[in-house]
Image (tube, rainbow, N blue to C red):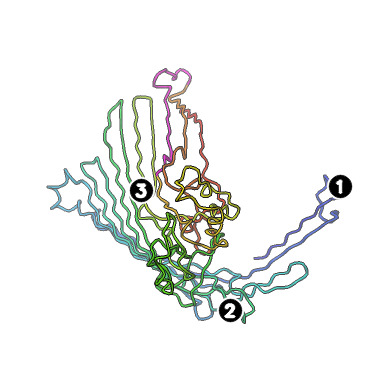
Amino acid sequence: MSNRSGNAWNLAVADVPQLETGADKSVGSYNQKVNSDGFSGGAQMDLLDRYVLDVTFRQDRSSLFGPENRVNNYYKVSGAYRMSEEGFWSGLSGMLPEFKLRFSHGTAGVRPAFSQQYEVWSVAGGNISKGALGNKDLKPQTTTETEMGLDFSVMDRLSVEITQSSTINEDQLLPVPLAGFYGYSSQWRNAGTLEAEATELSLNASVLNTRDMSLSVGFNWDKYDHNITSFKMPSYLYSAGGPKIFYMKEGTQYASFWGTKWASETQHLPEADQTNSSQFQVNDDGDKDGETIHQIGTSVSAFGYAFNANLRVQGLNVFVLFDGQSGGNIYNHTRQWGAREAATGDVDQYGKEDGLKKPTIYYRDLYHVNAPNDFYVEDGSYLKLRELAVKYNVASLVDLRGFGINGLNVGIVGRNLLTWTKYKGYDPEVGRGGGQLGSAVNARVDSYTYPNYRTFSFTLDVDF
């Protein structure tokens, strides 16, 4: 694959877009050559509408893989057993008309990028500098996932899905920092293993269903955690576009916050100061602990949840959706930056008792030269009115069939309407995308991030 591009400014004739007439020009190009092939196959079986089996196999070969890892095989096996289709289930079919067990196990891979094999240099201001050191021995990152589940319905009114999954990500592709004698800042390596566990629950119920009225509700709940179980390189701190608050180290929770922890009790003081602990007084914020980094928070919530309801009364239809999370933290980097200039609400001492009032320099010290510390770790719990939609079918009130119209729905939809949270920033649903964490869900750092917009939309649906 090759690409060539050119740009020109200050054209001799404004309406004639010819690059050679430009007074200022820039050109660029790149070439990539990747050889790859592979094949896949699979088989499916459905026996007596109760035993279901699906098997697939895939082999990939690519020049992006290191010389010792040119060929990589992947597979997936999944099956389901509809117990409710067995003869012995007839006595339960009225109560539980559907009852299914399911299982799946498989692997997948992530290819190294073309540029990760080669040395990267940059040219700026006439100076050449080294960037990343190439690695021609890279192999694909491999994901192995095992999932088990149970699906059943109750009297054709309530459907339930329960899922438990385990995921192992091996040979993770990471830009590992290098020691100074390498001459390069980093190198992509197959550096670690990440293991994750997740549990999901889904409930959907039809509460009422008549000609003039219906009501359906749904509830979803999920819980997950992920940990670095193996890391073959020296541990290091890294950022997701803000402070270096995340720690790549074996045995730690992935997406957790690390930094200075402020003491909240005198026994948290350094050992050398314990003999003088009576000279310290714990205030309502805390005292400095020391220079050792600690885990000060985590992006991982205790659990997430959502609730929805859909009500229809003749021509009126109302849909509402709430969602949120319990637990987990947000690192409020916006608030920390403001402390440097004494420009946050923390500095305002109005209304405090005299014994709790603090000087401005106190909060500048908590700024801590912009280094991560637990003063700016906040509870990330929240509940949102995510969506409210109200629609009315005018055709249920006025006969429009003479105009060739069978249905005419007008409505309004509002999103991100209300938020209940103790978070001090604009929006608890915040994070930094990209980087090694790859997702704003994992990197819950608020660093001058715009909040989600509150929107209102008007709708008009015509059914001819």
In percent of width and height, residue 401 lies at: 44, 20
Q: Report the span colored magenta.
A: 383-403
Front tag of 1 and 3? 3
Tag 2 residue: 179
Number of marks in picture: 3
Q: Quadrant of the N terminus?
A: bottom right
In percent of width and height, residue 107 lies at: 40, 67
Front tag of 1 and 2? 2
The kind of residue tagged 3 is Tyr
Whole-angstrom CA distance, mark 1 to mark 2, is 53 Å
Question: Secondary structure under badge 2?
Answer: loop
In percent of width and height, residue 127 lies at: 75, 71
Q: Nearer the viewer, residue 454 or 339?
A: 339
Tell me if residue 464 can be seen. Answer: no
Q: Nearer the viewer, residue 451 or 313?
A: 451
Asked if the magenta segment contains residue 275, the reply would be no
The kind of residue tagged 2 is Ala
